[in-house]
Amino acid sequence: MKYVDLNASMTLLAGEVIHGVISPVEYLERLPEFADALPVGARTFAVDPQHYDFHGPRCVKDLILERISYGETGGGNSMELALRHNCWKHGEDLIIRYEDVPDFRIGIAAPSGIEPRSVVILDEVLPHLDGCSHEIAFRPGIIMVVCRGNPLKSWRLFYAAMSC
């Protein structure tokens, strides 16, 4: 990730330093500089005040990758990520549909140990020559999707209430 720090350090009031924390601070500081360059749907998602509120019901942190789907729409490739809610935190699942996808990368290791699926650590949405890029860090792995900048179709979010 370019601005989201997945291995930050934090100094506590007593002076003790904790390493290995996640921090979207630099990304949030820089977001106003490039937000207008993002397609409308991606921008709405990225600037949502709950997006990086770790205690908020619409924070992406701790969502669980449920499935990845591929297809074609209007001659271009499409991709859909279904992210399941964490019952302790979220009240909704999140589905992100990307249309006109010229590039994507998936590097997710097979789950092991006590976490049965890939859990979102954080994400980052950035302008790209082809529209925008969305990089999602998981435990374990990463997904990066580039979608072309059609502001009405590139990025559709669906929140669906689900029971635990």
Image: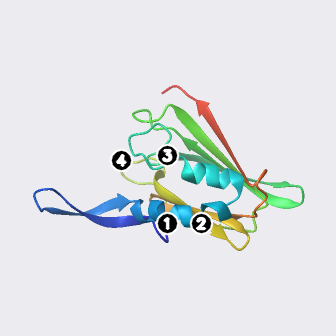
Amino acid type for the residue under numbered disc 1: Arg
Q: Nearer the viewer, mark 2 or mark 4?
A: 2
Residue 46, how many percent across, how many down?
57, 53
Residue 117, how many percent across, how many down?
48, 48
Are there few (<14), some (14-19), or many (20+) residues within 10 Å of tag 2? few
Q: Which residue is mark 4?
A: 114
Q: CA distance from mark 1 to mark 3?
A: 15 Å
Q: Earlier in the sequence, mark 1 or mark 4?
A: 1
Q: Residue 49, which numbered label?
A: 3
Amino acid type for the residue under numbered disc 2: Phe
Residue at left 62%, top 47%? 67
Q: Earlier in the sequence, mark 3 or mark 2?
A: 2
Whether residue 144 is visible to the viewer of this picture, yes or no, is yes
Horizontal side, residue 64 vs residue 6: left or right: right
Tell me, yes or no, whether the two marked residues, 1 and 2, touch with CB atoms within 8 Å.
yes
SS state under label 3? loop
Q: CA distance from mark 2 to mark 4?
A: 38 Å
Residue 110, how many percent across, how many down?
49, 58
Horizontal side, residue 108 vs residue 158: left or right: left
Name above or below for residue 140 compared with residue 57: below
Amino acid type for the residue under numbered disc 4: Ile
Residue at left 67%, top 65%? 37
Q: CA distance from mark 4 to mark 3?
A: 31 Å
